[in-house]
Image (tube, rainbow, N blue to C red):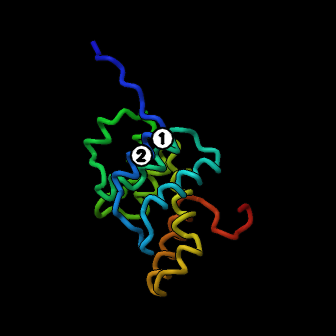
Amino acid sequence: MTGPRVPALSLAEVEATARAAHAGQTDKAGRPYAEHLAAVAAGVRRRGGDDAQIAAAWLHDAVEDAALSHAWLAAAPLSARTKDIVLAVTKRAGETPEAYAARVLATPGARLVKEADLAHNADPARLAVLDGPTRKRLTEKYTRMRALLGLPQPGSPGR
């Protein structure tokens, strides 16, 4: 016998949880980290993502950055699909980019979340404020991951 069903968190509750979990954190450019989360969630929505994918976008870095634990995610009132996507886009210690990309591609809905994440990470305006070596390293990293995921490069036909 199972216990009473706990309603899933609304997107507003997921957003509030993610913002609280990353409170005080900044990105490489010194901007509040929540701006990145909001941009990825908006990117997922613009690309036609559903609520499970939008929720995963808000939480996509939470476990990887240890803002929220694996135990929190396992117990959270979220859809199994949202949890699967979050786990798929969470990098693991020592993992190769190829293994990471394979897991993202094998998880329904994860590729779209990662596409929105890469698009925001590679935004020229965000990269412009970084020092030259960091900008070059990140641009190469994002280009490689887009290729591994079969995503068009920014500015290429089909974009």
Q: Is residue 155 above or below residue 57?
A: below
- The foreground one among 110 and 32 is 32
Residue drawn 58% across and 75% down?
125
Q: Is residue 27 above or below residue 48?
A: below
Q: Are marks 1 and 2 in contact (CB under 8 Å)?
A: yes
Image spot of residue 109 (x, y percent):
53, 44
Q: Is residue 66 above or below residue 106?
A: below
Label 2 Cα neighbours within 10 Å, binned few <14 / some 14-19 / many ≥20:
few
Q: Quadrant of the C terminus?
A: bottom right
From this viewpoint, which residue is outermost toward the right? 157
Q: In the rendered view, does 131 fall on the left or right side of 112?
A: left
How many marks the image carries: the answer is 2
Amino acid tagged 1: Ala
* Residue 157 position by quadrant: bottom right
Residue drawn 28% across and 42% down?
72
Image spot of residue 103 (x, y percent):
43, 51
Residue drawn 43% across and 65% down?
32
SS assignment at label 1: helix
Q: CA distance from mark 1 to mark 2?
A: 6 Å
From this viewpoint, which residue is outermost toward the top? 1
SS assignment at label 2: helix
Amino acid tagged 2: Ala
The residue under label 1 is 12
Image spot of residue 119 (x, y percent):
57, 63
Q: Which mark is residue 16?
A: 2
Q: Which mark is residue 31?
A: none
Residue drawn 28% across and 56% down?
66
Label 1 Cα neighbours within 10 Å, binned few <14 / some 14-19 / many ≥20:
few
- The foreground one among 112 and 131 is 131
From this viewpoint, which residue is outermost toward the bottom? 132
Q: In the rendered view, does 30 fall on the left or right side of 43?
A: left
